[in-house]
Image: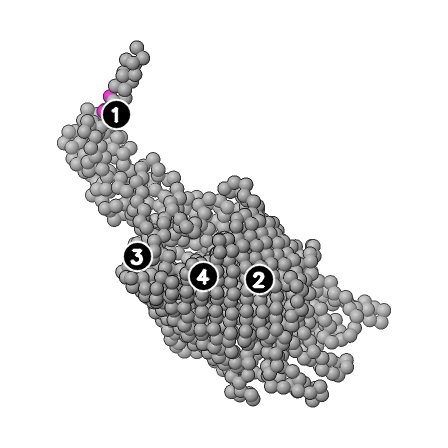
Amino acid sequence: MKYRAYLSYLFFIAIILNSFAQDNGNTIELKKILESISTQHNITFNYLEEDIIAFKTIPPNTALTLTEKLNYLANQTNLKFYFVTEHYISIVPNKEIKICGYLIDYETNESIENASIHYTQTNNFTISDDKGYFEITYSSSNPLEINHLGYKKLILQLKKEQVNDCNTYYLEPNSSQLKEVIAQVYLTKGISKKIDGSFEIQPKKFSILPGLTEPDVFQTMQQIPGINSPEETVSNINVRGGSHDQNLFLWNDIRLFQTGHFYGLISVLNPNLPNKIKITKNGTSALFGESVSSTVSIHTENTSPKNNNSFGLNLLNFDFNSDFKISPQSSLTISGRRSYTDLVRTPTYKNYYKRIFQNTVVSSTSNENIPFTTDENFYFYDATLQYDHKLSSKNSFQINLITISNQLDLQQSKVENTTTVQKNSSLEQQSFGGSAWFKRNWNAKHTTKMTVYASNYQINSKNESINGNQVFQQENTVLDTGIRIENQHEIKDAFTLREGYQFNEIGIRNKDAVTIPTFSRNIKNVLQHHALIAEGDYISKNQKWNATLGLRYTYISTFQKSIVEPRIRFNYQVSETLSSQVLAEKKHQTSTQVIDLQQDFLGVENRRWVLVNNDDIPIITSNQVSWGFTFKKNNWLISMDNFYKKVDGITSRSQGFQNQLEFERIAGKYTIIGSEILVQKQIQNFTTWLSYTISRNNYIFENFEPQKFPNNFDIQHNLELGLVYNADPFKIAFGSRWFSGRPTTLPLTDIIVDNDIVYNAPNSARLSDYFQTNISAGYTYTFDNLNKLQMGASVQNVFNTKNNLNQYYRINQNTNSIEKVNTYSLALTPNAYIRYFF
């Protein structure tokens, strides 16, 4: 009985299956099936050829009714059948049913942008966005084919049941993609050197560096040879001898005129954002202008298809970061960070305070030896928002917002004739910015992107003198707005062309008001720029030659002046282990920072932004060329870059002189020549490196005697040594930095002449050498795939070395003598953090 029941069951199943299909079980084209049904039932189908041509299926059983056959075909395809009349049926695709997914690099877990996804043997395609996301209408039973120049082809045999189920698909890199990176690990995991000579930092993949508890963007970039800050701040970063304002800092296409919290000791950008930082020292893309030194382009991108949240705390601030998937087509990323230094004063805060406020109004009374007390209230915060939306398979847009603030309230008091005198001063530094872009993928090889942006920076100070009734108010405001259109074509597999247009308007206002004696000024200037951009990339068939030629034409309408700037990048793969590179560029900028008085803005942020006027503040121009090579073998990395840079149009006011040139207003130039060398070795979980930079950086001021002398940022020798151990979940980093002393100017005599100090030749002496050792450690405890806990600690200046960062001389009005003022480095400073991901 059991045997018969089993046979009956199988027979019943066969009957059911047979009622929906022919006996032969072969798939045929849908068009032929429709022709057969039309003949059998005396009906007419109306459809577009392109809507049905890609479908194949097993024909329905001829014994079924017309309605049953149509229902069967609707289930097998993504088509809808409508009875227009009794014998006339319209067929249309169901566009609501889509296939979607995320494309991820198998080795790095990065999202893959601009991959082409299409049904085989059809013209129905889509392009993955910057998060690796794609979606395509279910319009064929053919397999999906995924192609990208940097990855191996992937074929997906999908079924209708998989629609709207956004899976993650991993692509395996091919050899050409690997050639886009010269060094996958540069100093530490998360930093790589690209074939175009730029450096890429990805904090989410970041391992650890000496002295850093978290991947601080602008602190991290100082580990790269040729980039340093002789004052230990992120608000005075020098790249190949250039001053800080000669760098272009961009966050999601928003220009940052403010880079530091705590007036330069930490970055204004939350280190826990999913940033990708690209640093270019030479060979800048023609898409970028307005800098004569480096370009630092930072983009925030969320590569995870799931919600991600984290919050953390260190000895200065707390922060949070959240990624929300609002829908399969849209996401929202928000972050916030605030210090609690106005509530709790940790050892880290106290050391930072001593470092940044020494020799300023905050900690002195301008040589008046009168006892006074100071009560300061300081805090900072920053917040960002990013919204992404995929309008369709070809269209997407993004909106970005950022706000940054440093707030200092200062209350000083003294007892004078038994009466308490109290004065209140303040310093407020704020930035607001926004950008939005729209991107259209015309096809797999042609994209267009339009970006609009705005950036507003403002610094205000009120200085009430503790020794008098003078009130000094200052304001510096910058408004930078613009639009950029970029168009990219992949003409052949070996050649890509980019062209574009950029309009930019920048306005800068400077206001000053003094009560005693009464004085005020209000100066505002505006400049407009139009730029045409053309750039082409070429990669030879054998992958040995890689070249980029760019041209940027800028018209400054205010001055009716045209500037043509060529950009060149050329790389040749000599062998599997050796590559050589030549970079060259011509650039200009029309905004710069100057110092009127060293005690402006309480002496804390004494630089103010100004615009060129084509007169005493000329347009700054630069020419730079470099040649280098990279050798890789057996986990050894040896890299060398030789460079020469000439920057013309600088002013003495922009260089921060504190000698006989402090109050001069003359224009000049500087030239720097040097070499950067890195030797790195990886041994299992250890990475160790030694970098050395040698350079000579000289000013030339033709209207001053002597005409030529060392640059204020002339660091002739810079040596760094580092060791990183990274074996998840534990990591530790140890490193030291030494560089030769900065130039300084000594008095020629101790005698004051006409109430002035008589100096030796500018920068004819040197400060003592700088040396600092730092250490960091971190540990990650993973609960599951989503939840983990990170902990870490760092110590800056482990040996508490007292380094002299700056030295100048002033007249002590009480003793009528010359006194020396030194600015010293950060003392031994611990920090610690804890962070939870969920």
Q: Residues within 10 Å of mark 4 (few under 14, many from 20)?
A: some
Residue under the point 70% across and 64% down:
410
User: Which residue has dot 2 on it?
Assistant: 735
Determine whether, in the image, residue 208 is placed left or right of residue 95.
right
Q: Main secondary structure of the magenta part?
A: helix
User: Which residue has dot 1 on it?
Assistant: 17
Q: Nearer the viewer, mark 2 or mark 3?
A: 2
Tag 4 or tag 2, which sits nearer the N-term?
A: 4
Q: Residue 291: x and y, percent?
A: 47, 71
Tag 2 or tag 1, which sits nearer the N-term?
A: 1
Magenta segment includes 19 = yes
Classify the position of the C terminus by image quarter: top right
Q: Residues within 10 Å of mark 3 (few under 14, many from 20)?
A: some
User: Which residue has dot 4 on it?
Assistant: 636
- Badge 3 amino acid: Lys
Q: Which residues are magenta?
A: 15-20
